Image (tube, grey):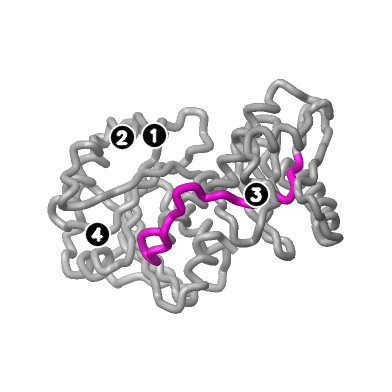
Amino acid sequence: MSAIKTLINKQNRKVSIAIIGLTNSGKSELVKRILQSDEHILASVGNTSEFEFQMFGNLTLLTWDLKNSIPANKALWKRSILGADALFFVVDTIDRESFDLNRKLLLELVYENFPIRLLILGSKSDLPSSASVGELINSLRLMELDSTKCKCDLFKYSSKTGEGLYAIEEWLNKVLFKQRERIINYIKIAACMAFFEESNTQMGAILDDTPNISLLTIMREVKRKIVIFSRTMRYHDIGEEVIKIANYKVIIVKLHTKIVALIVGSNDSIPRAIEIAKNIHKVIHPYNDQAVKLHKIISDLYPLDIA
C-alpha cells in the first residue's frame, strides 16, 4: 500500500485529490502508484473524455487532461477540481517544449480559480534529462505568482522508483491534517545496512544499545529485501522504497550502485530518514568493501538520531 493511501486511510474523513496536467505528463502513472490496487471504482463522465475519477475507500482521485486552456465545462470543472481537498499540477520534467504552455495554464488556474492547496509535481525525476527543481521554478515563473491568491509548493517525483512520493505524503499530512512539523524532527535509527552492487557485498550496523530478537530477525529480512530491491531497480540510478516490518519502518534508498537501508521507529519521519540515507551515501560513495564503518559514520553525523 502506498504511503499516501495509508496516510488517508488513517483519517476518519473522506479526502479528494484533483490531479491535472497535460496529456502524457505522468498523471495516470501517479494514480497507479498512489492506489497500488485494482480494487477501486473507475468512472468517467459522458461526453467528457478529459475527466475521470477513481474511488478507493475514503480516497477519491479526480483526473483532468488539460489542452490549451482550462476546460470549457466550467460547472464540472468547478465541482470536481476546486471542490477537492488538494490539487496536484503535474509537469513532465523531460518535455521542456511544454514548459511555456504549462506556465500559461498554471497562471490561468491561479488567477481565475484561486486553488487553496496547490502542489506542483515534476514527474519522471528518474530520467537523466529531467529538469532540475531550479529550472522548473524559473521556467514556470513560480516566484512571480501572487501569494495572496495561491500558495504553492513544488516537488519532483518518479512513479517508477518512488523517489519523492514520501515528501508528497508529508505535504498532505501538513496541509490537510494540520500535523505540525517539529523544528528538529529527530528519528531513532535502530540499525543500518549498506549494499554495494559492484562488489555484491553487504554490511550492517546495529545502533540500538539494547537490540531485541525482533530487530535481529528484521535485519536478516532486510538483507533479502535489499537484494530484491537491487534487482527491481537495476535500470534506475535512483530509487526509494519504504516497507513496514513488525514495529519498524525500513527505508531503502538507492543512489547509483549503492543501496542504504535504515531501520527506524514505526512513527518516525520518512523524509528525514531518506535525507539521512542519502547523506550516508555521500560518505560511503568512494568505498566498495566492508572497510566502511557504518556505526561510526552514523554516530558521528547523527548522534541524536540513534535509538
Q: CA distance from mark 1 to mark 4?
A: 22 Å
Q: Dot 3: what SS? A: strand
Q: Which residue appears at 19% of the width and 49% of the height?
A: 69
Q: CA distance from mark 3 to mark 4?
A: 32 Å
User: On the picture, is 275 further left or further right than 66?
Assistant: right
Return the residue at label 2: 137
Q: Nearer the viewer, mark 1 or mark 3?
A: 3
Q: Earlier in the sequence, mark 4 or mark 2?
A: 4
CB atoms at circles 2 and 1 under 8 Å apart?
yes
- Residue 252: percent from the left, percent from the top? 66, 46
Which one is in front, 303 or 45?
A: 303
Which one is in front, 217 or 166?
A: 217
Q: CA distance from mark 2 to mark 1?
A: 6 Å
Q: CA distance from mark 3 to mark 2?
A: 29 Å
Which one is in front, 253 or 50?
A: 253
Q: Earlier in the sequence, mark 3 or mark 4?
A: 4
Tag shown at residue 116: 4
CB atoms at circles 1 and 4 under 8 Å apart?
no
Q: Label 2 is placed on what type of residue?
A: Ile
Q: Label 1 is placed on what type of residue?
A: Val
- Check disc 4: other Cα within 10 Å, few if <14, some if 14-19, many if 20+: some
Q: Residue furthest top?
A: 286
Q: Which residue appears at 40% of the width and 66% of the height?
A: 177
Return the residue at label 3: 251
Q: Label 3 is placed on what type of residue?
A: Ile
Kindly tell me whether residue 109 is visible in this rendering: no
Query: Is 14 included in the stretch rendered in magenta?
Result: no
Q: Which residues are magenta?
A: 174-193
Return the residue at label 1: 133
- Check disc 2: other Cα within 10 Å, few if <14, some if 14-19, many if 20+: some
Q: Which residue appears at 45% of the width and 78% of the height?
A: 12
